Image: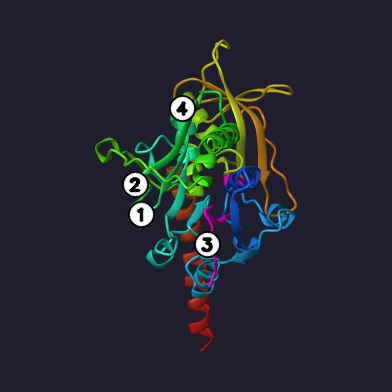
């Protein structure tokens, strides 16, 4: 049986930069951290901004273990053995099951980068970046809802139209420090006073997938730029196609002075310093940082006059002709086979 003390026993679980920032703050404020759970690196392929925790835990002599799924019996048994008063779950895309939620004596602390109750749900950093909406480092008591539990600490930060996803994450991490520096001394003293959210003000974000980064060049330049900013590092990136290959656009900017007009998606100017000037459905956009995703040895190059993306009707027509050719060849082979027999 684990002996209890006046200082709350803390366990932390997570897998990204915000998790690491939280652990550093817990150590800095000398909380009684009795265990750390990190997502196994083999399971990190689809985790944006994955971060290891073992070095911080080991340096502070805190027991450390890794997991594939936080709800497995083995992981639950380990948390039960650590007997936490508070379980921090920060930066983990896996849902925490009711059995694990019920283990801590005080509760599970979740984290969300929006000004809850606004912006509950999925992919909040991408949505905040795209919409230029203020965020907040918010720590709350987890329940069976989606980011709906009472709030323990909340520190707002601004998001501007010049911010990329990585800029928002840096602002978020700074806000995490401020929020935890203010709240953790109270937690260390045994204070636990969460404030309920106002569900009437709740808004929700839906999930995003890498395919949502596909650029539609018929959209206005401002919308495309917002997509580029929101999906840039550490996210998979906004993308288009050129010469049959995928091209990721990591950085872009609006052009407001050059008096050009062209077909949406066509490269109008190539500048060795500024990049590639592309016409959109409304306005011009400089593609400043482009990465070609090549399968073979050939590396496609963007050039003046090239049209980005696909024209669906043309591609369907090409496929229809290829199918017709294949059907004619198959018909000839079948006829030749019958003649031989």
Q: Which residue is mark 4?
A: 132
Q: Is residue 245 visible?
A: no
**Disc 1 residue crowd, few under 14, some 14–19, many 20+, Cα 10 Å:** some
Q: Nearer the viewer, residue 117 or 251?
A: 117
Q: In the rendered structure, are the residues bearing label 2 and label 1 in contact, judged by CB atoms less than 8 Å apart?
A: yes
| C-alpha span from label 2 to label 1 | 7 Å
Q: Which residue is mark 2?
A: 148
Coordinates of residue 339 in the picture (x, y in percent): 50, 83
* Magenta run includes residue 17: yes
Q: Is residue 258 visible?
A: yes
Tell me the SS state at disc 2: loop
Q: In the rendered structure, are the residues bearing label 3 and label 2 in contact, judged by CB atoms less than 8 Å apart?
A: no
Q: Which residue is mark 1?
A: 143
Which image quarter: residue 5? Answer: bottom right
Name the residue: 50% across, 54% down. 89
Residue 4: which disc?
3
Range shown magenta: 1-18
Tell me the SS state at disc 4: loop
Coordinates of residue 324 in the picture (x, y in percent): 46, 60
């Amino acid at each position: 049986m684990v002996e209890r003390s006046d200082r709350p026993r803390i366990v932390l679980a997570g897998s990204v930069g915000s998790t690491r920032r939280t652990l550093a703050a817990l150590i800095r404020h000398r909380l009684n951290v009795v265990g750390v759970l990190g997502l196994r690196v083999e399971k990190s392929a689809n985790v944006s901004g994955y971060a290891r925790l073992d070095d911080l835990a080991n340096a502070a002599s805190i027991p450390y273990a890794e997991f594939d799924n936080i709800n497995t019996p083995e992981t639950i048994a380990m948390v039960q053995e650590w007997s936490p008063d508070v379980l921090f779950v920060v930066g983990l895309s896996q849902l925490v099951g009711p059995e694990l939620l019920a283990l801590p004596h005080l509760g599970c602390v979740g984290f969300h980068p929006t000004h809850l109750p606004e912006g509950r749900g999925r992919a909040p950093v991408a949505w905040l970046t795209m919409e230029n909406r203020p965020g907040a480092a918010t720590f709350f008591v987890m329940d069976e809802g989606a980011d709906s539990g009472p709030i323990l600490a909340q520190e707002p930060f601004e998001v501007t139209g010049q911010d990329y996803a990585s800029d928002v994450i840096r602002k978020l991490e700074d806000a995490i420090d401020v929020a935890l520096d203010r709240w953790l001394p109270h937690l260390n003293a045994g204070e636990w006073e969460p404030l309920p959210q106002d569900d009437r003000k709740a808004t929700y974000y839906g999930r995003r997938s890498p395919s949502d980064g596909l650029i539609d060049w018929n959209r206005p330049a401002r919308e495309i730029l917002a997509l580029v900013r929101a999906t840039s590092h550490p996210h998979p990136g906004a993308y288009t196609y050129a010469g049959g290959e995928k091209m990721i656009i990591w950085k872009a900017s609006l052009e407001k002075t050059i008096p050009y007009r062209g077909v949406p998606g066509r490269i109008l100017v190539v500048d060795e310093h500024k990049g590639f000037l592309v016409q959109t459905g409304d306005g011009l956009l400089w593609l400043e940082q482009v990465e070609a995703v090549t399968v073979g040895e050939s590396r496609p190059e963007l050039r003046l006059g090239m049209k980005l993306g696909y024209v669906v009707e043309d591609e369907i027509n090409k496929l229809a002709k290829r199918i017709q050719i294949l059907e004619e060849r198959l018909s000839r082979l079948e006829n030749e086979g019958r003649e031989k027999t």
